[in-house]
Image (cartoon, grey):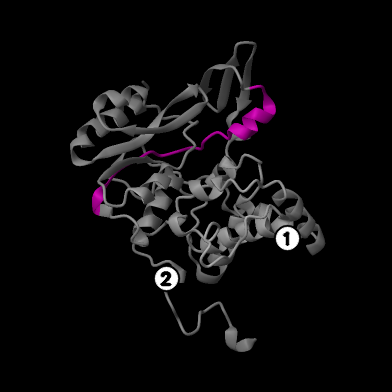
């Protein structure tokens, strides 16, 4: 174990008597694939890891364990989901023990896959700003920034916004904030028909597996999900572009003022559909209208949880 992993392990051991279990990160089937690790007893910590391949937002599991006492290891973007869940009364802060991990970014496996064959990775390590990947046939070195998940390129919350224990020093944000909505702004420069065709093409690949919904930490009404409801019957099971577009638009609207930009929806998509762009546009609208970003301030009230006769930036009477 690294020094950081040793510290995390020790903290979890000390907290196990206070919680039913701990959610951390564990070794996957090779060095570049990490899996969620559920720690019930000390021996479970043998598989603990904490590195740049810990991409999952484990806060997604909290919505299913509301009445249990749970410990969790979080990065900055993960912690925003925890805050949002607490704000909405979906989990109880008193039932949580949070270990915060300052983060300089995680690796996108999809980006790495574009650069090399990752089917037989034997070793992966970080040296300064480089990532070295060894397979049974070759060794390659990459600049870390070339492999970072897109969300990391503009991250303003490298240090978790909520925690009981912090492992490591606080990291000040250094990424350019203006990059956050750059891809949305560039797309909006295109003709409306071009954008329409783009989304028709992208969403036509959707297989309606609902991985994007299932992984989302803020998709909390899965037992009554509109995508599967038959009473009322909002959406059919037809596999056509109309239904696929409707699914993603409903998903985005249900996340208005709630999406924490963790990017999990796009990461898990088996068809590589860039659906995070839709969420980013919704986030941009909410930030412009309400000066609000989800999961930042525990004391704040999400804008769609409030009502004002007239919003400062929505000039209804002028229409």
Is residue 179 in view from this perspective?
no
**Percent x, y of residue 182:** 66, 53
Q: Residues within 10 Å of mark 1 (few under 14, many from 20)?
A: few
| Number of numbered labels in the structure image | 2
**Percent x, y of residue 304:** 46, 70
Residue at image position (36%, 38%) is 169
Residue located farthest toward the left when viewing the structure as drawn: 17
Q: Nearer the viewer, residue 21 or 11?
A: 21
Residue at image position (46%, 48%) is 157
- Residue 305 marker: 2
Q: Nearer the viewer, residue 147 or 255?
A: 255
Label 2 – label 1 distance at C-alpha: 29 Å
Q: Is residue 14 magenta?
A: no
* Residue numbers of the magenta segment: 94-117
The residue pinned by badge 1 equals 188
Is residue 28 in view from this perspective?
yes
Q: Quadrant of the C terminus?
A: bottom right
**Percent x, y of residue 318:** 63, 87
Q: Is residue 58 above or below residue 133?
A: below
């Amino acid at each position: 174990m690294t020094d950081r992993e040793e510290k995390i392990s020790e903290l979890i051991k000390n907290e196990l008597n206070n919680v039913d279990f701990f959610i951390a990160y564990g070794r996957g089937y090779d060095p570049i694939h990490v899996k969620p690790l559920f720690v019930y007893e000390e021996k479970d910590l043998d598989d603990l890891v904490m590195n740049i391949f810990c991409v999952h937002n484990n806060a997604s599991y909290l919505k299913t364990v509301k009445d249990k006492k749970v410990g969790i290891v979080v990065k900055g973007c993960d912690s925003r989901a925890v805050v949002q869940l607490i704000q909405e009364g979906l989990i109880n802060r008193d039932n949580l023990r949070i270990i915060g991990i300052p983060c300089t970014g995680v690796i996108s496996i999809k980006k790495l896959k574009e650069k090399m064959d990752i089917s037989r990775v034997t070793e992966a390590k970080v040296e300064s700003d480089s990532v070295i990947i060894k397979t049974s046939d070759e060794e390659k070195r990459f600049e870390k920034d070339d492999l970072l998940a897109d969300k990391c390129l503009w991250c303003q919350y490298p240090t978790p916004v909520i925690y009981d224990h912090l492992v490591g020093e606080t990291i000040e944000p250094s990424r350019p904030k203006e990059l956050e909505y750059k891809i949305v702004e560039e797309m909006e420069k295109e003709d409306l028909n071009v954008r329409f065709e783009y989304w028709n093409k992208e969403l036509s690949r959707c297989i309606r597996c609902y991985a994007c919904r299932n992984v989302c930490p803020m998709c909390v009404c899965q037992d009554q999900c509109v995508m599967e409801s038959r009473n009322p019957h909002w959406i059919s099971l037809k596999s056509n572009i109309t239904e696929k577009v409707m699914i993603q638009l409903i998903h985005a609207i249900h996340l208005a003022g709630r999406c924490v930009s963790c990017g999990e929806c796009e990461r898990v998509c088996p068809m590589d559909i860039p659906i995070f762009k839709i969420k980013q546009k919704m986030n941009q609208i909410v930030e412009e209208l309400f000066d609000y970003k989800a999961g930042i301030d525990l004391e704040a009230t999400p804008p769609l949880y409030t009502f004002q006769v007239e919003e400062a930036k929505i000039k209804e009477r002028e229409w």
